Image (cartoon, grey):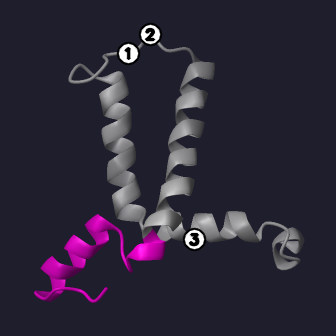
Amino acid sequence: MMAVRRGWFAALQMCLAAVGRMAFTNYIAQTLICTTIFYGHGFGLFGSVDRWQQAIVVIAVWGIQLWWSPLLLRHFRYGPLEWSWRALTYWRIPGR
């Protein structure tokens, strides 16, 4: 907490905040990426990937989300699924 309060991880905090603002989109993206890698409709690698290789997949997915979430939120107010959810919930197009 002291490191965060001193601003040592400001860039990481911004990226994590963006990932949090796009939690629904990122959750579904993780699901699609990992099921594509591990299940039959994709590469079918379930049970054939070692733990260290699984860790690489996790780190890669996190890295992608830490990169793409702030990038997307620079141009849009919400992630695509958050936008859709709000549109369906409130029955109107959310502002940009």
Q: Position of residue 71 (x, y in %)?
A: 49, 64
The reply to whether dot 3 and dot 1 touch (C-beta < 8 Å) is no
The numbered dot on residue 61 is none
Which mark sits nearer the N-terminus, 3 or 1?
3
Identify the amino acid type marked 3: Ala
Identify the amino acid type marked 2: Ser
**Residue position for label 3:** 17
The numbered dot on residue 45 is 1
Taking the magenta stretch, the answer to whether it contains residue 81 is yes
Does 89 appear above or below 38?
Answer: below
- At 38% from the left and 76% from the top, the residue drawn is 76
Residue 22 shown left or right of residue 40 in the figure = right
Number of numbered discs: 3
Q: Quadrant of the C terminus?
A: bottom left
Q: Position of residue 46 (x, y in %)?
A: 37, 17
Q: Position of residue 53 (x, y in %)?
A: 57, 20
The numbered dot on residue 48 is 2
The magenta span reads: 73-96
Taking the magenta stretch, the answer to whether it contains residue 13 is no
Identify the amino acid type marked 1: Leu
Task: Look at the numbered disc 1 and give the secondary structure of its residue.
Answer: loop
Q: Residues within 10 Å of mark 1 (few under 14, many from 20)?
A: some
In three-dimensional space, the C-alpha distance between marks 2 and 3, rounded to whole angstroms, equals 34 Å
In three-dimensional space, the C-alpha distance between marks 1 and 2, rounded to whole angstroms, equals 5 Å
Residue 4 shown left or right of residue 13 in the figure = right
Task: Look at the numbered disc 2 and give the secondary structure of its residue.
Answer: loop
Which mark sits nearer the N-terminus, 2 or 3?
3
Q: Residues within 10 Å of mark 2 (few under 14, many from 20)?
A: few
- At 36% from the left and 37% from the top, the residue drawn is 33
- At 84% from the left and 78% from the top, the residue drawn is 5
